[in-house]
Image (spheres, rainbow, N blue to C red):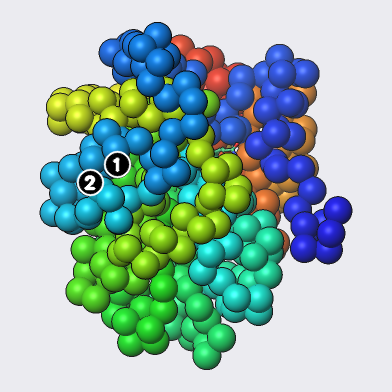
Amino acid sequence: LNRRLTEFGTTIFAEMSALAVSTGSINLGQGFPDTDGPEDVREAAVRALRDGRGNQYPPGPGVPELRAAIAVHQERRYGLAYDPDTEVLVTAGATEAIAAALLALLEPGDEVVALEPYYDSYAACIAMAGGRRVPVTLRPSEGGFRLDLDELRDAVTDRTRLLLINTPHNPTGTVLTREELRTIAELAVERDLLVVTDEVYEHLVFDEAEHVPLATFPGMRERTVTIGSAGKTFSFTGWKVGWVTAAPGLVAAVRSAKQFLTYVASGPFQYAVAEALALPDSYFDAFRADMLAKRDLLSAGLTDAGFRVFRPAGTYFVTTDIRPLGESDGFAFCRALPERAGVVAIPNAVFYDHQEAGAPYVRFAFCKRTEVLADATERLRKAFT
Ligand code: PMP
Ligand code: GLN
């Protein structure tokens, strides 16, 4: 393994999901739903398979039906008009979109300013692209983990090529506010930076929180690569259908890298996701309401068990502080948790460069059936009280 990748080892999600299986624990670690997405959408995939749509290599940019549906979705929800032929690219999940964007846009030595904690593939992809990551740490406060905009500003240097943003944010559940996003946008324009923004949890925002795409701010449409995923929005993480929307030059750049990663992927599923994106608002509302109830159930259960809970404004993850339990090392805690309680969680430290800043935090996923969450919280309560 080369020096760029040795520091990354095996992804925490594989390690923890294997631990869940080997110990028979409830897996609240890796974020994948335990209920598949809509029946009609599965039927659409079956129809595509039967009708021979997508069984051979689909077009490089994605099938036209899906590119059109993505463009309509961005226009309908956010008023962002993208040309499906030149400004939309279908990828093998958001994971490939992130990789291809970074590989396409970074020169060796370029700095990438990213929010810390960051989704684990960001660091590895920046490294594969020969870039340098410059993390800006979200700080815990009463209201959750917040971005210090002065720290963000200070992190930008002459070597900064791009900002890598994620909202709603995995693992903290933070949703950047309109004011915060406006400041990020102004900074990007002022310093002439590109922005890659991972918005895969765009449909999972709760209470008063609102998802505002960075591309909607003045001067941003032409410098922003926006990433979405059917895995998250329609609960089909195994289908690996994601997408990028951006200005033609940026999409062409990302496509240049993408064509040599997977070339194309998920043919029949692309047709099904095109139908999914056209579902009425009631689908998205019900999805959000379901996750909101689950958030509240898991948050209450974790609080009962003695964790300090940072109630997420978005995503399907809740970050907790384990210090009220007399613990301080999230790694050790998560490695012992299956034996101790029969539950698997993720130590947030894996998402940090500043290990000490992330050490006491542990993430639980709530995209699970109600009875599974009830069972898990009961196990945790028994183990810790
Ligand atoms: N970005 C974030 C923030 C995620 O949480 C995930 C999924 N865990 C991804 C990207 C990857 O998405 P996909 O499964 O579509 O590759
Ligand atoms: N995005 C999911 C999470 O954060 C996991 C994806 C993966 O396993 N690569 O849990």
Callout 1: helix, strand or loop? helix
Q: Position of residue 153 (x, y in %)?
A: 43, 83
For badge 2, the amino acid type reads: Ala
Tell me if residue 21 comes above or below residue 316 in the rendering: above
Instruction: Report whether residue 103 is seen.
Output: yes
For badge 1, the amino acid type reads: Arg
Tell me if residue 5 comes above or below residue 342 in the rendering: below
Q: Residues within 10 Å of mark 1 (few under 14, many from 20)?
A: many
Tell me if residue 339 comes above or below residue 139 in the rendering: above
Q: Position of residue 348 (x, y in %)?
A: 62, 49
Q: CA distance from mark 1 to mark 2?
A: 6 Å
Quarter of the image for residue 269 reads top left
- CB of mark 1 within 8 Å of CB of mark 2? yes
The residue nearer to you, when weighing 100 against 187, is 100
Quadrant where the C terminus sits is top right
Q: Which residue is mark 1?
A: 67
Disc 1, ligand 1: is the CB inside 8 Å?
no
User: Residue at 60% across / 33% down in the picture?
Assistant: 29
Tell me if residue 48 comes above or below residue 277 in the rendering: above
User: Residue at 76% across / 43% down in the picture?
Assistant: 10
Instruction: Report whether residue 357 is seen.
Output: no
The residue nearer to you, when weighing 325 against 26, is 26
**Residue 71: numbered disc:** 2
Q: What residue occupies the far bottom of the structure in this picture? A: 158
